[in-house]
Amino acid sequence: MCDSGMECYKPKNNSNYTVLFLQDCRNGCRILSLIDDKKHEPFLYDNGTETNTSRNFYHKVDSIGCNGCESLNKCRTCNKQSTLDNLQITSYATTAEITWSVTSDFSRVDLQVSKISAPKKPVWEKDVAKSPIVVKDVLDPEENYTLTVYFYQDTRINNLKEQEWSIAFNRDFRTLKIV
């Protein structure tokens, strides 16, 4: 857990601790934690010292996670972005413009355009793409294509698996189907 003062702490023993969480909405809502080390082992700050665990001391919790204090320090607020919004493909002969919406500064979008007949050989790719982006002069009006979108919800989290969507479209850039 990390508190509102940017201090992070974790259980001394991951299998022997008790924390009570309370919601306090007297002056704006916040989450408070009370660490009970009377029956269990204490929590430690990053520097190894024990946290205050008196019955009258509550920590103002800013973030909670399972991957240690380092990951929580990277992510000081909740990231609500879980999907890509308003994805559109607009054609201009052999060129296409792709647009989408992402509200989080920490999300990542990678794109690939492939011929349906050769899906493993992209004709165009862009990692860390920003909307709008143009696929310029690589599209054949007589071919059908697949746009594959790889979406990473929060790049601050290590080993986060991407979400993947593929959209097939024809020479008129009408969507054929979502795979």
Image (cartoon, rainbow, N blue to C red):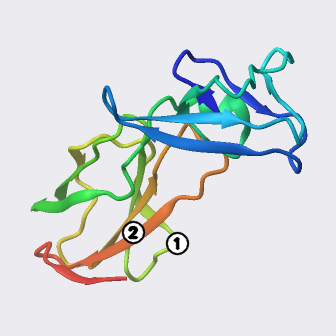
Looking at this rendering, what residue extends furthest in the front direction? 56
What residue sits right under mark 2 in the picture?
114
- Tag 2, which secondary structure? strand
Quadrant, the C terminus: bottom left
Name the kind of residue labelled 2 in the image: Ser
Numbered marks: total? 2
For residue 168, the mark is: none
Of the pair 90 and 50, the residue shown nearer to us: 50
- Tag 1, which secondary structure? loop
Residue 88 location in percent, x, y? 17, 61
What residue sits right under mark 1 in the picture?
120
Q: Quarter-wise, where is residue 30 in the image?
A: top left
Crowding around mark 1 (Cα neighbors within 10 Å: few <14, some 14 to 19, many 20+) is few
User: Which residue is at a point 74% across and 23% down the rendered structure image?
Assistant: 54
Of the pair 31 and 4, the residue shown nearer to us: 31
Circles 2 and 1, Cβ within 8 Å, touching? The answer is yes
Left or right: 140 as drawn, with respect to 60: left
User: Which residue is at a point 59% across and 58% down the rendered structure image?
Assistant: 161
User: Which of the marked residues, 2 or 1, is nearer the chain's N terminus?
Assistant: 2
Of the pair 77 and 150, the residue shown nearer to us: 77
Residue 91 location in percent, x, y? 11, 62
